[in-house]
Image: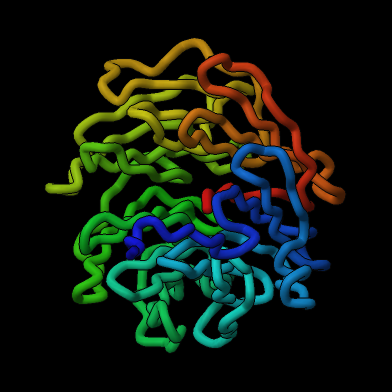
């Protein structure tokens, strides 16, 4: 009697497989960032999983996380640290501090890890994207970019970098060709492009918050659709007297947060929705599959919480305590 390999039981890859990871920034300037794990059915959760596994702190202001194969990369902003862990066990594999200066967000393409860096915030000309080997974290090169590179998303051999402007203001998307490690195009969009997502037809959607009231000139939000074949803006939607945030795409629809509510929009719509589907807002937000997740930082000094809504019923399904200043929400 023989056994087919397909009949072999699939052993768990680690304690944190098939769940949700919340990156908690921690208190700014002191303390440490942490990571919270939530089971995919929301039945259990565990805070400070990185320290529980590695018996050490991550560092100050855990800005973001990105995945590649069985690895996760943790970008620690103020401490200027990049940590690679096994995404399922959270055991640390490598940590580096060199060639980072105010690192923000990261993405992996073709075995290379691209990390946005603000550089010295008093110098508006030293911003860059650092390139590392994704396996070894050996530094390869830096790509000079416009002021305030922030979130980044990949499609094919291009990465798209949103320039919010660091502590200033900006309105650019850099297109970087990863085969040459060079900027192939700069797209001017609305002020403060804060969110990026790609739909099923490979269109890039950019949600721009607009300049805040304390800017020299306040501007309002814009939602832009970019054709990634031509890298040209094909559609723009202007918001009236508001600063929308936290764009995401799931199940063929766009979701974002604005004026204390969560809005749902078909990608084929000719106008912005006028009514929210859920009344809630938070420090960060994402819609994924059948749920909407709202991170609430509360007083920014003590534990926050994530509120989980069912997108079908629009009802609150679960509230879970997380760490201080919960920022990113990632699905493992």
Quarter location, residue 93: bottom right
Q: Is residue 241 visible?
A: no
Residue 255's place in the image compared with 55, above or below, is above
Quarter location, residue 65: bottom right
Tell me which residue sits at (56%, 14%) in the image: 313
Residue 96 percent across, percent down from the top left? 57, 85
Tell me which residue sits at (65%, 51%) in the image: 22
Q: Is residue 194 left or right of residue 32?
A: left
Tell me which residue sits at (79%, 59%) in the image: 27
**Residue extending furthest toward the right:** 302
Residue 195's place in the image compared with 85, above or below, is above
Q: Is residue 44 visible?
A: yes
Q: Is residue 40 left or right of residue 140?
A: right
In the rendered view, how is the structure colored?
rainbow
Q: Report the number of numbered marks.
A: 0
- Along the line of sight, the residue nearer the viewer: 239 or 32: 32
- Along the line of sight, the residue nearer the viewer: 170 or 201: 201
**Residue extending furthest toward the top:** 275
Residue 55 percent across, percent down from the top left? 79, 77
Q: Is residue 45 left or right of residue 8?
A: right
Residue 279 percent across, percent down from the top left? 64, 18
> Where, quadrant-wise, is the N terminus in this rendering?
bottom left
Residue 104 percent across, percent down from the top left? 53, 64
**Residue extending furthest toward the front:** 1
Tell me which residue sits at (79%, 42%) in the image: 321
């Amino acid at each position: 009697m023989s056994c087919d390999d397909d009949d072999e039981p699939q052993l768990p890859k680690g304690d944190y497989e098939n769940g949700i990871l919340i990156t908690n920034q921690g208190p700014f300037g002191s303390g440490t960032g942490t990571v919270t794990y939530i089971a995919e059915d929301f039945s259990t959760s565990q805070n400070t999983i990185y320290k529980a596994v590695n018996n050490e702190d991550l560092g100050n202001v855990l800005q973001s996380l990105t995945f590649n194969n069985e690895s996760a990369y943790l970008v620690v902003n103020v401490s200027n640290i990049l940590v690679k862990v096994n995404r399922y066990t959270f055991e640390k594999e490598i940590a580096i501090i060199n060639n980072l200066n105010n690192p923000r967000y990261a993405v992996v393409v073709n075995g290379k890890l691209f990390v946005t860096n603000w550089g010295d915030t008093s110098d508006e000309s030293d911003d860059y994207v650092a390139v590392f080997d994704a396996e070894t974290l050996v530094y390869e090169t830096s790509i000079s970019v416009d002021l305030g590179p922030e979130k980044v998303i990949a499609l094919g051999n291009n990465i798209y970098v949103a320039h919010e402007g660091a502590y200033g203001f900006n309105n650019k998307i850099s297109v970087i060709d990863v085969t040459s490690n060079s900027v192939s195009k700069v797209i001017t969009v609305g002020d403060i492009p804060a969110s990026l997502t790609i739909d099923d037809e490979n269109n890039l959607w950019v949600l721009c918050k607009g300049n805040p009231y304390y800017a020299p000139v306040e501007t309002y939000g814009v939602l832009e659709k970019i054709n990634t074949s031509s890298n040209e803006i094909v559609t723009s939607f202007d918001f009236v007297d508001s600063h929308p945030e936290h764009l995401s795409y799931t199940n063929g629809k766009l979701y974002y947060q604005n004026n204390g509510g969560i809005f749902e929009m078909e990608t084929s719509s000719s106008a912005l929705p006028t009514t929210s589907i859920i009344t809630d807002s938070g420090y960060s937000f994402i819609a994924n599959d059948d749920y909407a997740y709202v991170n609430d930082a509360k007083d920014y000094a003590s534990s926050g919480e994530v509120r989980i809504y069912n997108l079908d019923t629009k009802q609150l399904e679960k509230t879970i305590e997380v760490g201080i200043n919960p920022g990113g929400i990632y699905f493992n």
